[in-house]
Image (tube, rainbow, N blue to C red):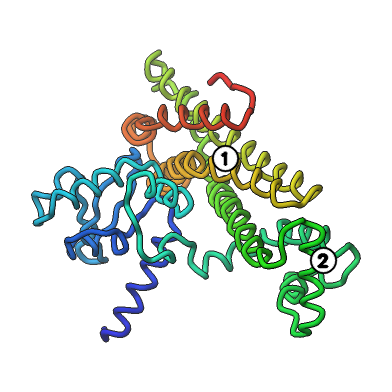
Amino acid sequence: MSKDKDNKQTAEELSVARDAIDKLPLSNIPLSSNALKNAKLIKNARMETTVELHNDSLSGSLQVAPESIGDFMQTSPRDQEIIKSLAGLHSFDVYSLRTNLKKLGVEVEDAEALDLSDDMKEGLSIYSMEFVRPLVEKIFGQGREDLQTTEGLQKIFRDTDMARAKENLRVMAERTGIPLADIPKFLEEYSDVFLSVAYYRYGFESVGPDVERFLFWMHDLRSHRDTSSPKVAAQCKEVEDTMRFLANSIRERLTQFQSGFETFWKDINHDSFLQMRKQIEENHASMGSVLCGMIVKMNMWKKTFPDNNVGGPSTRIKFVMTELEPGLLKLKELEHEARKRLGLRAIRV
């Protein structure tokens, strides 16, 4: 493989990892060890963080515990401190990372490293119409043909007619109370907020079918005589109930975010935007954490049991106890805390 092709592959891999909720490339983290900069942090099904030092199709993945990194390479005390802090995060999605890295005092010089890739943004465009059209309708009026397609919406803001473009911006400033000079920044911030909601929604909807099959799988397992032991039956029911609660609660939180946008569209101004953004950004960490846990666990379960005919009851029970149950209590606690902050009713699980 040529050097250019190898570099391109590495760039593509980093781009994919940057969009992932369960992986963190260390290339942009301020570490002194070059060897560590080629590694990444990943979450396993138990929601433990490991340092992946190497991974290829022939030799597989070499993973070590964060606290053992000094046994495999020379690292500075500061590097080890940073790795330990990052390993304690519940999610590696770019939105929760922005907040958490700041709290940890870890400064990333390349801002692009904390942004979704262009490919992911394009993939999320399926959600953009419902977020952008109401905003544009409110500002420029309903009934415009431009509002019916994504291309039309983009045309409004990329109008080559400078006079009309300036008039559009003047109308926006007048109707929102946002100074004309601040309109571009406002649109950029609005785009970032709705992209974060679209990103979490995309993650949730991508794992939704797996959760549905899993709940059916668990119900079938609990009806088997091998789970007649009261302890095993109780543990299986706890796992099933918790996963159902997490799925239902995340769906409710995403609906709450949507309601926040709808309230904002009714009275578009800078203050209402700041209120909506604050509510959503304060939920980035918990949304990322719970979604990360669900996605990692469901991906591992789907890989182990690609259909409901794979594995006998004892194999399934062992997987539930050793891979699915660990970490679920923490996810449940995080979700309860998030519901409380949003003012959603408490649910006993």
Q: Position of residue 111 (x, y in %)?
A: 42, 64
Q: CA distance from mark 2 to mark 1?
A: 47 Å
Asked if residue 244 shows in the view, the reply is no
Residue drawn at x 29%, y 52% is 41
For mark 1, does the 10 Å Cα neighbourhood hold few (<14), some (14 to 19), or many (20 or more) residues? few
Residue drawn at x 56%, y 54% is 199
In the depicted structure, whether residue 327 falls above or below residue 189: above
For mark 2, does the 10 Å Cα neighbourhood hold few (<14), some (14 to 19), or many (20 or more) residues? some
What amino acid does circle 1 point to? Glu
What is the tally of numbered marks visible in this picture? 2
Circle 2 or circle 1, nearest the eye: 2
Q: Position of residue 212 (x, y in %)?
A: 57, 40
Q: Position of residue 33 (x, y in %)?
A: 17, 61
Instruction: Give the label on residue 212, or none.
Output: 1
Q: Position of residue 173 (x, y in %)?
A: 76, 63
Asked if residue 167 shows in the view, the reply is yes
What amino acid does circle 2 point to? Val
Q: Is residue 1 left or right of residue 151?
A: left
Mark found first going from the N terminus, 2 or 1? 2
Name the residue furthest right.
Answer: 143
**Viewer-proximal residue among 240 and 10:** 10
Quick one: SS at disc 1?
A: helix
Q: Quadrant of the N terminus?
A: bottom left
Quarter holding residue 289: top left
Quick one: SS at disc 2?
A: helix
Q: Is residue 153 left or right of residue 46?
A: right
Instruction: Give the label on residue 327, or none.
Output: none
In the depicted structure, whether residue 60 falls above or below residue 275: below
In the depicted structure, whether residue 246 falls above or below residue 15: above
Residue drawn at x 25%, y 65% is 56
Give the labeled residue for mark 2. Answer: 171
